[in-house]
Amino acid sequence: MEASCLELALEGERLCKSGDFKGGTAFFEAAVQVGTEDLKTLSAIYSQLGNAYFYLKEYGKALEYHRHDLTLARTIGDRIGEAKASGNLGNTLKVLGRFDEAVVCCQRHLDISQEQEDKVGEARALYNIGNVFHGKGKQQLWGCTQEPGELPPDVRETLQKATLYYEMNLALVKELGDRAAQGRAFGNLGNTQYLLGNFVEAIKFHRQRLSIAKEFGDKAAERRAYSNLGNALIFLGQFNSATEYYRKTLQLSRQLRDQVMEAQACYSLGNTYTLLQQYEKAIEYHLKHLYIAQELTDRVGEGRACWSLGNAYVSSGNHKQALHFARKHLDISKEIGDRNGELTARMNVEQLMEVLGVNESDLSPSSSEFEMQGETGNIFASEKLNTVLMRLGYSFDCGFTSLQKFGRDPSDEDCFFDLLSKFQSSRMDDQRCNLDNPENGDTRDGSGSMLSLSEMLDPAVTTSPQTEELFDLIESSQSRRLDDQRVNVGNLPGLRITHNNLGHLVGEGDHQEPSDDFFNMLIKCQSSRIDDQRCSPPEGGPHAPTVPDEDFFSLIQRVQAKRMDEQRVHLPSDEQDDSDSADQYNALIFSLGV
């Protein structure tokens, strides 16, 4: 039985390393079913299961097993194990949008690492706390419509905290000589400076990140750095330079055979060429984006591609094609329940019909006109590009609902990228907790390190002192105030209690009562989530994998929704154109059932 449990766990680890997380979790779960009396083995299995479920985006299950790992680590007095389990919990809570709780867990990781003089663990904890504040700042930015850099005080403060922790992380990993970690820190700092509107600083950091990515031959990180550089250069008005970086992004995406990133690069190139009034190229890349979105059944991405194509065709004077894509945009917006998109598309359709002098009855179904031949894989065979006449005398303001005479005012060039992608998180995320399957198939300890099962079981890697004062502290308080919610290690899945491990599970120290701060922090962190700790990630609207996450297009939609009345103008005709961190942590893990 003992050998079987370990053998099952090792097979689960092998499958996870090969990228088969579904198969890996099945073997790990089987190992838990067999059970073991070896506490270190069980802790390692919990950690690996939590990580595997994390990469599968089953965050409720990830939270469950990291809680089990933390409970076991605290029970046996394994301080390093407790630190790592806390880091794992922090990363999972961050993804669930529970940032205050995530900070408490990550701070515990930091405190224990400093206590144990574990410099590597300390660096990872600093990195994780920076990630939490970065994620919180991005979430706070979601409802903002300010110009880049003009942030509400609370958002600026959050992002400055992220910067502080990233700077401390960078200083420590430099001391440790960890070049790979330095690359991640540079990328993080670049992303944070980007959100703060410090684009020159962002470019400096992303160039350093690019240099280290090339040093390691890390093509995925190199691609992300190119994309981030392009984003920052857009805000500096250096559109031609931005296209060069986006082209490199596209080239590497194809080398990596990453269709999602390829589509995002096409999307960025299409919009940048629109800014440059190079409409033929803009249409070419938007059509490529549309084709990939169709191939991946990304209806949200399709809708945005159709909107962008409509803009480009209007700017080129081809109102017939613009009407076709405006109608497609309207149909898709209705289908996916995008109210703002539907209002904008409906207004565009009405205005284009007026310009063309046609009625609804004159039109064939939008699905049959200029139909894309996705079945043949050749988008351009059906999308016959008409000769595009560049109308340099006109530019559009956040969509083709507001065409105006172009006077070469610099602000006109920037209008289409109004509030451009200051939230483009999915293309700059090698610096944060990676939610995608790691390319090398390894699982992490939740704080950035890759640990194998054998390493996790190696006493030289993880120590296991026999103290359990903190666990007893929690248990005694639960006994006094929540008698029916007592932690019972006997209920841990896969744990076979024998005389060999009983001494490690029963503490003999004096029981101490925590102060009322323990419960105050519990209420502060958990007031809205007591009933259901295993919530799924908050929905951020329809998912569009082929469009940069939180991209400028969404921001334009929100801006347009607020000023819809202003945009009801006529199109031109064809003739025109810390001190409480321990209390917070104890309260949090109590509420999590640890």
Image (cartoon, rainbow, N blue to C red):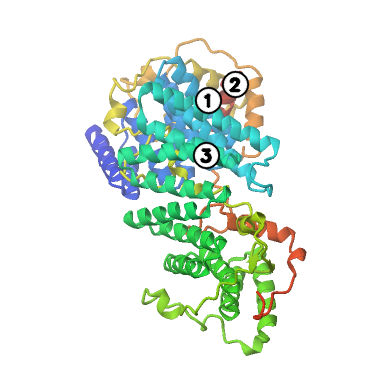
Numbered circle sitting on residue 578: 2
Callout 2 secondary element: loop
Left or right: where 295 falls relative to 567: left
Mark 2 and mark 3 residues within 8 Å of each other at the beta carbon? no
Residue at screen point 43% across, 54% down: 244
Name the residue that disc number 3 marks: 202
Mark 1 and mark 2 residues within 8 Å of each other at the beta carbon? yes
Numbered circle sitting on residue 53: none
Of discs 1 and 3, which sits in the foreground?
3
The residues tagged by marks 1 and 2 sit, at their Cα atoms, a distance apart of: 8 Å
Name the residue that disc number 1 marks: 107
Of discs 2 and 3, which sits in the foreground?
3
Disc 3 residue crowd, few under 14, some 14–19, many 20+, Cα 10 Å: many
Left or right: where 515 falls relative to 135: right
Residue at screen point 39% across, 21% down: 175
Counting from the top left corner in percent of width and height, residue 113 is at 44, 20
